[in-house]
Image (cartoon, grey):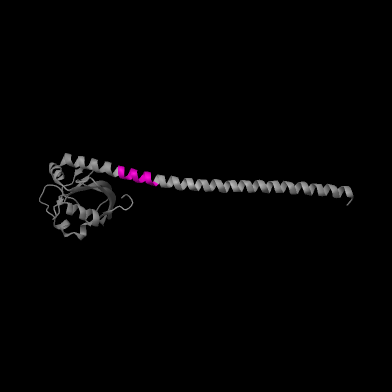
Amino acid sequence: MNKLSKILLISQLAIFSTMNFCQAESLWDKTTKAVSDTASKVVDTVSDATSSDTTSKEKARHTINNNAQKALSRLFRESKEAKELYNKAAGYAVFDSREVAFLIKTGFGSGVAVNRSNHSRTYMKMASGGINIGGGIKSMQMIFIFPTHKAFNAFVNDGWTAESDASAVAGDDSSSVGITLKNGTKIYQLVDTGLMLKASLSGTKYWRDTDLN
C-alpha cells in the first residue's frame, strides 16, 4: 500500500469514528430524554389515576344517592304506609340492584343507609343467590325503614344476612305490602312493574362498602 493510500484510509477511519461518536452521543441523548419523558408520564399517570379514582368514587356516591332518592319518591307514591313509617323512622337504607335469574339466581348491587337524626350516610353493598325456575334479568330496589336507632346501627355496623336472622322468615306478613321484621324494620321491594306485595329476601346479604366510606 503506498503512502497516499494509507493517508486516505486513515482519514476515512477518523471520519467514520467521529460520525459513530456523534451518533452514539445523539442516541444517548435520545435515550436519556426518552427515559426522562417516560418518568414524567408515569408520575402524571399516577397523579391522574389518583385523581380519577377520587372522582369515580364521588360519582359513585352521587349516583347511589340519586337512585335512593328516586326509589323513595317512587315508593311514597305507591304506598301511603311507607311514607308514614319513614316520617317516624330513625333511619332508612335503599339498595339498587340487578338480578340475573336463570337456573341459579344471582343479584348484586349497592346502596346507602341514612341516619335521619344526623343525616350521616353509610354506603353499602349487597349480594344474593339461590335456586330459580325460569329466566330473565331485572333491576330492583330494596328499601329498609328502621324504626329505632338500635335496628339501624346493627344493620350498618354489623351488616345483615337474611338467613342468619330468623325474623326475616318469621316476620309479620299481615300488611298489604312488604315484610315487617320482628325488630320493627319494614322492607319494601320495587321492581320494573311496581311495588312487590311481598319482598324476596332469600339468600341476601348486606355489608359496608369499605371503598366508598
> Looking at the image, which residue sits at the far front?
118
The stretch in magenta equals 53-62
> Looking at the image, which residue sits at the far left?
174
Image: 156 above or below 52 = below
Residue at the image point whose x is 68% and y is 46% from the top: 23
Say whether residue 54 is magenta. yes
Residue at the image point whose x is 34% and y is 44% from the top: 58
Q: Which percent across, then down, holds residue 69? A: 24, 41
Residue 165 quadrant: bottom left
Q: Which percent across, then down, holds residue 167? A: 15, 57
Say whether residue 117 is magenta. no
Dominant SS type (magenta): helix
Specify whether 31 is left or right of 61.
right
Specify whether 13 is left or right of 74.
right
Residue at the image point whose x is 24% and y is 43% from the top: 68
Front-lying residue, 66 or 21: 21
Q: Which percent across, then down, holds residue 158? A: 24, 57
Specify whether 13 is left or right of 104.
right
Q: Is residue 7 visible?
A: yes
